[in-house]
Image (cartoon, grey):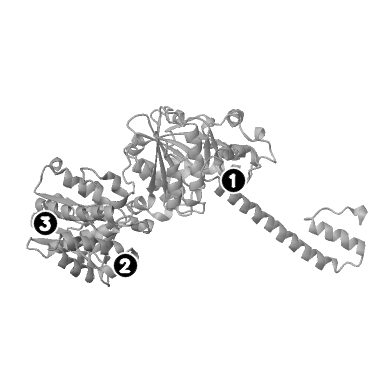
Amino acid sequence: MILGDSISQLNSDFFELTGGIHWAWKNYDELGNSDRIGFMCCRRQFIFDSINNFSNNYCGAVVNFDRFDDNTLRSIKCSPKIVIKIVSKYDFIAASPVDYDMAVYKHFNKYHNVDGIVFCLNIIKQRYKKVYPYAEQFFNQNLNSCCSLFTMKRDIFFECCKFVFDIAFGFVKNSDRSNYSFKDRRLFVMERITGLYFYYLSKQDEIKHRLPISFIKQPEMVLNPKPAFEINNIPLVFVSDTDYSKIAAIAIQSIIENSSKVNNYDIFIVGREIWNEDKRRISNMILDLKNFSIRFIDMNYFLANTDIDKSLICNSSRFSKGGTYYRLWIPRIFKNYDKILYLDSDIIVTCDIAELYAQDIGDNIIGAVHDIEYIRIAYKKHRLSDFINKYACETLKISPYDYIQAGVILFNVTLARKESFFEKSFDFLAKNPNPYNNDQDVLNFVCKGSIKYLPVNWNVEWHCVFFCEDHPLYQSLPAKFYTEYMEARKNPYILHYSSDFKPWSMPMLPLAEIFWQYARRSPYNEVILLELIRVINIEQQRKYKEKRRRKFFATLICALIPSCNMRHRIRDAIVNNGAKIKKDRI
């Protein structure tokens, strides 16, 4: 094994020793040949303050933070002035050790293959006789600083690297790891060897210091998203949770299949509770696609850092924790974008979504499609017509025929921020805490007079025809909207599976086959099929229990009827769910 300038091929074995520390050692001139060097990583940073100022510290050495942001930097006092003041005092700084409540050797043996420690100790005994006595002390004590955070003078750093990498390469080249577990094939042993050398340094004459560290639970969190691509960037935002993430994945599948190679698709999934396995599956959908990016945004951070009454966004919808309102944050979260396209998860896109993003919405806050179902209810011959008309005029201050559907929204982010869209949205909610259609009412009220109405093809609500048994749709809509809707239904650019009717539970309904066309090629096909089987089984069980209940009552009633002929006919009628009994047969 040749110790060259780059050992990136060993990343899977060496952790940060390859990408950071070894590169710095072999390319020190490129770092300006400074008299000091320091190392921190994405999940751990030094705290330049007393650990006693943190009530949630672990063993007086570590403080957990949910995420890394400006508030975290302020908490750990990581400012240039403070860092320079502390670092300049000491030749060597390392992380405060943690008390394992057992010897370091015994602790390693409990969780890893201790043969690695034995092998490395033999190398140290042979090559570094001055260090070896400290090795015995270190592995027999309870205190260990196992993370590779440090600041050192240049000469100390070079000596440290020489020692650590000599041991590391000797171990990789000469040890037999064939029976090691997959976990132990990664060199956790080198964390202990690095910790040993830090212990050795702490016993020398150099001026040394220990600092507590922060641990970031979610280092990958996206807080200030910027365009993923420099040109032809098409930003798309979904709001989802773990239950609906598989549905969002099928929508993304349709976007992928109808995409163009000349465009770049910058996809975000916003939510609070999306499992890591779902993130993995969805991210893997674009592994081989260079013009796609998928990022996840945790709304917990934005909720915690927004001064609003959280009760205003809780509702009885499927998003019981307020998820349907998250789209109101879009102008705030995506402030580095001029325009954002929001999409509901329960959609299928049948053309290049870039065509919708390219729509010119002029000097309007949003571009959206008329809500055909809302207009159908408001028009006539519906039990809610009077209420909807009054509510639209008096509360939303709009005509019901101007009402838009919020499942597909093209946001002019720049104008929305300028017009205080977010603040006005929550002002409306404070005055109207229980809007009829949740955030959709908010959008209609706040954006009235600043809406570019897009062709219905871009948001075809599939369920409108299902609610018209008493009055056909051509009698329930103004002619203009009926004609446009029916034409769009023949050629939907975006098919929106809105309402409680869903193609994954009702595949027999018209246009459900379009959903399944893309579901079959998504990573969730088997999951959706399994859930459909469960729905069918539950329905069959419900019908079976209902039939048993009817049989029970039929038996009780028939016991009081003297005529045998009559008893059979009444029993059959009850069991068959109230079938009519013809008088001439009684």
- In three-dimensional space, the C-alpha distance between marks 2 and 1, rounded to whole angstroms, equals 50 Å
Q: Position of residue 481 (x, y in %)?
A: 58, 30
Residue 43 seen from this side = no
Q: Residues within 10 Å of mark 3 (few under 14, many from 20)?
A: few
Residue that mark 3 sits on: 86
Q: Residues within 10 Å of mark 2 (few under 14, many from 20)?
A: some
Pick the front one: 261 or 509: 261
Residue that appears at 75% across and 59% down: 547
- Identify the mark nearer the N-term, 3 or 2: 3
Q: Which quadrant of the figure has residue 43?
A: bottom left
- In three-dimensional space, the C-alpha distance between marks 3 and 2, rounded to whole angstroms, equals 36 Å
Reply above or below: 238 against 98: above
Which mark, by number, is residue 504? 1
Residue that mark 2 sits on: 109
The answer to whether the residues at label 1 and label 3 have Cβ atoms under 8 Å apart is no
Q: Amino acid at mark 3?
A: Ile
Task: Name the side, left or right, on which 535 lies relative to 11.
Answer: right
Residue that appears at 65% across and 35% down: 473
Quarter holding the C terminus is bottom right
- In three-dimensional space, the C-alpha distance between marks 1 and 3, rounded to whole angstroms, equals 60 Å
Q: Give the total number of marks visible in the rendering.
A: 3
Q: Position of residue 403 (x, y in %)?
A: 51, 37
Give the label, 2 or 1, closer to the camera. Answer: 2
Task: Name the side, left or right, on which 44 lies relative to 279.
Answer: left
